[in-house]
Amino acid sequence: MPEYGYYKKIPRPESIEYFKTTLKGHSKVSDITQLETQLFKITKTNDKEFLVHLTNFYIVGEAEVYEILSNHSDIKLDAIVTISNWNQCTSDGKIVAKQNDIGLFVMSDFLGAINYDGQNFINYISPAELERSKSRHR
């Protein structure tokens, strides 16, 4: 049956399961609770909790961040994660997220960022992203 773009924003069920399973196995995560289809509460081993919006936007830019924030105007998100391996985040999207004290990540970067708290979490730059940045400035 055709999906007619249903999974454009919402992750596929198998992607949600992958997210939950992967985080349950992360050394810094003690618990993960799915609050809504795309909203998760993650409790770290240091007892810090944070809220994550999981999306399937192919490219998460400024407009997508604002859309996600407007859908959660009653709560304080800590992170937005786009799940699929081929998805990406724009620099403008990251700027808007940071201005709202939110980390914006692709899944692989999120798995690294979760090792940190506070501004180190929000401003996390993966080793691969750091290397790309260095090669652009050479």
Image (cartoon, rainbow, N blue to C red):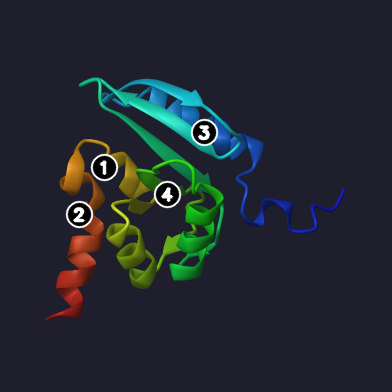
Q: Is residue 65 left or right of residue 30?
A: right
Q: Which mark is first along the chain, 2 or 3? A: 3
Q: Which mark is first along the chain, 1 or 2? A: 1
Give the residue displayed 20% in from the left and 21% down from the top: 46
Assess whether mark 4 and mark 1 are in contact (beta carbons under 8 angstroms). no
Badge number at residue 112:
1
Per the image, the residue denoted by label 2 is: 127
Residue type at numbered disc 3: Tyr
Judging from the image, what secondary structure is the residue with disc 1 in? helix
Assess whether mark 4 and mark 2 are in contact (beta carbons under 8 angstroms). no
Residue type at numbered disc 4: Ile
Judging from the image, what secondary structure is the residue with disc 2 in? helix
Question: Gap between marks 3 and 2, in whole Å?
Answer: 23 Å
Q: Is residue 1 left or right of residue 78?
A: right
Residue type at numbered disc 1: Gly
Measuring from the top left, give residue 124's x and y in whole percent: 22, 51
The number of numbered discs placed on residues in the rendered structure image is 4
Q: Residues within 10 Å of mark 4 (few under 14, many from 20)?
A: many
Residue type at numbered disc 2: Pro
Q: Which mark is first along the chain, 4 or 3? A: 3
Assess whether mark 4 and mark 3 are in contact (beta carbons under 8 angstroms). no
